[in-house]
Amino acid sequence: MSVAAVSSNFGEGGIYSTFGAADAIDWDPPTEWSSASDGDTAPIGVKLASETNITSVGFWTQTMGDTA
């Protein structure tokens, strides 16, 4: 699985930067992706390695106080 598209990354970094989009799909709970203040309009797209029958999707979300 890889990042196919992302609205932005915190601090204008790349997908592999701290809080970059790659952190959203690395299976490591302590890491996380954060957009650059995109709020509810912060999409991320992923590309699967091959055609796959998806039976469920899970995600964690959080807020950052009054700023998110």
Image (cartoon, helix red, strand yellow):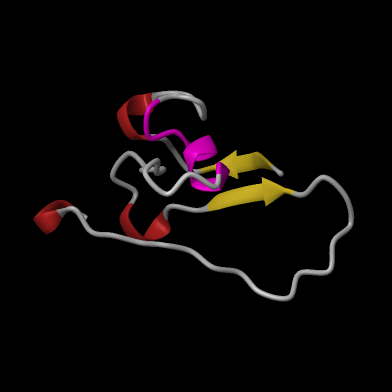
Position of 13 relative to 31 (above/below) = above
Residue 8 position, x and y percent, is 44, 38
Residue 57's quadrant in the figure?
bottom right
Question: Does the magenta segment cover residue 19?
Answer: yes
Would you say 54 lies left or right of 7 here? right
Q: In the rendered image, which quarter is residue 61 located in?
A: bottom left
The correct choice, above or below, for 63 with respect to 23 in the image is below
Residue nearer the viewer, 45 or 31: 31
Which region is colored magenta? 18-26
Name the spot of residue 25 as percent of width and height, x first: 56, 46
Q: Is residue 52 left or right of residue 38?
A: right
In the image shown, does 48 or 66 lie closer to the viewer? 48
Q: Percent x, y for residue 40? A: 36, 61
Q: Is residue 40 left or right of residue 54?
A: left
Of the 4 image quadrants, the one containing the N terminus is: top right
For image coordinates 73% across by 75% down, the residue present is 55
| Quadrant in the rendering for residue 26 | top right
Residue at (41%, 43%) from the top-left corner?
Answer: 33
Write the residue at 23% across / 59% down: 63
At 48% from the left and 39% from the top, the residue drawn is 23
Quadrant of image for the C terminus? bottom left
Residue lying furthest right in this view? Answer: 51
Q: Residue furthest bottom?
A: 55
Residue 35 included in the magenta stretch of the image: no
21 to 17, vertically: above or below: below
Question: As rendered, which of 16 and 31 lies closer to the eye?
Answer: 31
